[in-house]
Image: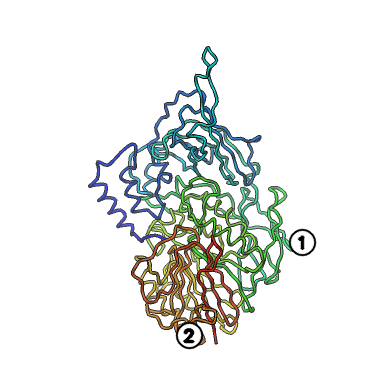
Amino acid sequence: MEQPFSSLFTLLFSFIFFSIRPCLSSSSGLHPSVAASTFLHRNSTAVSDFRVVNRRTLLECRDPNPFLQINVNKNSSLLSNEEWVTVTVSGVLLPLENDWIAMISPSNSNIRDCLESKTFYVQTGDISDLPLLCHYPVKALYVSSDPAYLSCEKKECRKHDSNGRCEIRTCSATVTFHVINIRSDIEFVFFAGGFLTPCILKRTNPLQFSNPNAPLYGHLSSIDSSGTSMRLTWISGDSKPQRVSYGNGKSQISQVSTFSQQDMCSSSLIPSPAKDFGWHDPGYIHTAVMTGLRPSSISNYKYGSDAVGWSDVIEFRTPPAGGSEELKFLIFGDMGKAPLDDSTEHYIQPGSLSVIKAMVEETKNGTVDSIFHIGDISYATGFLVEWEFFLNLISPLASKLSYMTAIGNHERDYVGSGARYQNMDSGGECGVPYESYFPMPTAAKDKPWYAIEQGPVHFTVISTEHDCTPNSEQHQWMTKDMASIDRSKTPWLIFTGHRPMYSSSLGIVDESFRSVIDSILLANKVDLVLFGHVHNYERTCSVSDSQCLAMPEKDENGVDTYDHGNYKAPVHAIVGMAGFSIQRFSPFVAGWSLVRITEFGYVRAHATRNELMLEFVNSTSRAVIDSFRITKS
């Protein structure tokens, strides 16, 4: 989610800010332009000390310490596909709180000055004339995360005097990084000066992955409403077609694609992170469709090739066919990812780990048919390696169930790219990585809207980041789609996308979007509207044109029940509480808002032909903290 700023306003504000405050420059703190970007880009690239580390003055560490070392505690220089790497710094004469270690990839990146690319950093608001790091660290840890470091509990005598007493003692520390196979080699670099005034002390030798071509991060999606075909998408460093083997001896050859820096969006005035310092080679994206499956059934697969290796055998479940009697699914938005170690990364969504953990536990018993993630998927926002950490995180879910997605502002929006909202929220990705990693059953590239039926539910999935005004292609598509639904086959119609039409959080709703869509939903008797973008949970009455047309009644268990046998208007719910820091509500609440919750979690849904039941599950306690029913009498 972001507050919408036009490109004109952004440039105008920058000009005024820098014109009236020329004297704020400091070599030790935030340059005024970076400070300004906290306002202008606070949700585009989420500026923090670490996130602008490659826009800092890079000082020379004048450190004559001959004892200083940084080492990786491994018997081999080769890395597996996923492991915890222990890094030790030793020979430190004076441990300081702002000493830190960065994981850099590729290891041959120039981590010194990068003056020739200074204009590329304007994306985060920095228009200063400073030496800049050419490459963005993947992640970083303060050495003080080892509690023994600052107190120098791990001592070693380096020099004795003539009486045998220790004359020089040094300190050491050990930190641990979670590392996944991102194909390019890595190194660990010891910095002094914190993120504000970094200087290089020592660096390790490069570490390579034992199999940079390994097939990794396989995830599933539905290609149609039959439940008999599933698409598998995975990543490899190898461009040659690979294979998915599934069921009893069936197999399909993969189609291979990739994308490059040239595919990323940018502009002549404000080049993007995706185009420069946030770029990481994505390798090759493989997709293959498994056909001849049975709906609502268990099968298994593995993917890869004899040349690059094979994945483990993975058991998965197909969703029910459209028109069948029952569907159980999970739905949420704005999840992203967080590191499994104690490191800081470009963009962290703190609730994502608890939400993933809770959903993995829920899916273990086989009671979930599919998953819907409705926008703001990885929050990579132009720092491409973040996609792979996200794919690694969701693998326990997405490798076993149909993982359907909708595009959000942090996947698509970029000024001048044709997106509906002219901001920088995708960091220059403009939908390319999203559509590559998550191919949905859409009509064409950069038309990320689609419909799919599972069980008794018809899902109309739109892109709120593309034009949906009455003469637009998407408007014509959604109108035709909803008008053609056979409600005797799929009695429930769920309309979903990213940006909401109703929210009690101020400054969020695009009134023009709501005015266009409201009447379509009412005319087609949409039962339920689910959006994300706002990082909380909110449920409405049966609402249209900002008016409550019907209120739910309590059933015998005290659960709010909406009677759509006597249909009045859709029920709306915001489900953007799956990872990003929770957003508080305004004290000014409209009458259509019935429930507002500021906790992390996800929504569990169960649809039969006569009832649609939804429950908001708190991801920490696993308790249901809101539930409601929609019935057809």
Could you tell me the amino acid type at mark 1? Gly
The x and y percentages for residue 50 are 43, 44
Q: Is residue 362 above or below residue 116?
A: below
Position of 415 relative to 21 (above/below) = below
Relative to 603, 30 lies left or right: left
Quadrant where the N terminus lies? bottom left
Tell me which numbered mark, 1 or 2, is placed earlier along the sequence.
Answer: 1
Above-or-below relation of 307 to 418: above
Q: Which mark is residue 249?
A: 1
Side (left or right) of 271 relative to 354: left
Q: Residue at x 66, y 54 (%)?
A: 241
| Residue 355 occupies quadrant | bottom right
- Nearest the camera: 583 or 59? 583
Mark 1 or 2: the one toward you:
2
User: Which residue lies at the image location 41% right of the left edge and 83% below the top edge?
Assistant: 549
Query: Which x, y percent locates residue 567?
Result: 48, 85
Under mark 2, the amino acid is: Tyr
Q: What residue is rendered at 43% in x and 33% in y? A: 199
Q: Position of residue 257 (x, y in %)?
A: 58, 55
